[in-house]
Image (cartoon, rainbow, N blue to C red):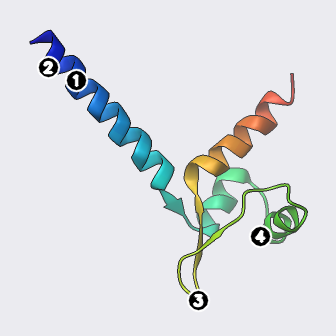
Amino acid sequence: MFTENTSNNTINEQTTKQNQELRLISLKDVVARTALSKSTIYQLIKDNAFPKSINITTRRVAWVAHEIDSWLSERINARY
C-alpha cells in the first residue's frame, strides 16, 4: 500500500512539474508579475536580459510562466 501511494505521489509531482513548465502567460500577466512596463519588457528582451516570448499565432505571443518566475527569483537572489 505504501509503495502505491509513493508511486502516485511521484506521478502527481511529475504531472505538476510538467504543467508548470507548459503553462503560458500573456503579456498582461507578465506585466503584473514583474511590475515592469511593456516597453521595459520588450527592451530587456532586445538586450537578451529577459525570457523571450513564444509566438502562439501570427498575432499572439505568450511567455512560459516558470521562465518568468525563474527570472524573478534570480533578481531576488541577486540582492544577497
Left or right, 21 with respect to 1, comes to right
- In this view, the residue farthest toward the bottom is 58
Q: Tag 2 or tag 3, which sits nearer the N-term?
A: 2
- The residue that appears at 77% across and 70% down in the rendered structure is 38
- The x, y position of residue 2, in whole percent, is 15, 10
Determine the secondary structure under disc 1: helix
Q: Is residue 68 above or below residue 27?
A: above
Q: Are marks 4 and 3 in contact (CB under 8 Å)?
A: no
Q: What kind of residue is marked 3?
A: Thr
Q: What kind of residue is marked 2?
A: Glu
Report the residue marked by disc 3. 58
Determine the secondary structure under disc 2: helix
Q: Tag 3 or tag 1, which sits nearer the N-term?
A: 1
Residue at mark 2 to residue at mark 4: CA–CA distance? 48 Å
Report the residue marked by disc 4. 38
The residue carrying pointer 1 sits among few (fewer than 14), some (14 to 19) or many (20 or more) residues within 10 Å by Cα, namely few
Residue 22 vs residue 35, the one in the foreground:
22
Image quarter where the C terminus lies is top right
Residue at mark 1 to residue at mark 2: CA–CA distance? 5 Å
| Disc assigned to residue 4 | 2
Q: Tag 1 or tag 4, which sits nearer the N-term?
A: 1
The residue carrying pointer 2 sits among few (fewer than 14), some (14 to 19) or many (20 or more) residues within 10 Å by Cα, namely few
Q: Are marks 3 and 2 in contact (CB under 8 Å)?
A: no
Q: Are marks 1 and 2 in contact (CB under 8 Å)?
A: yes
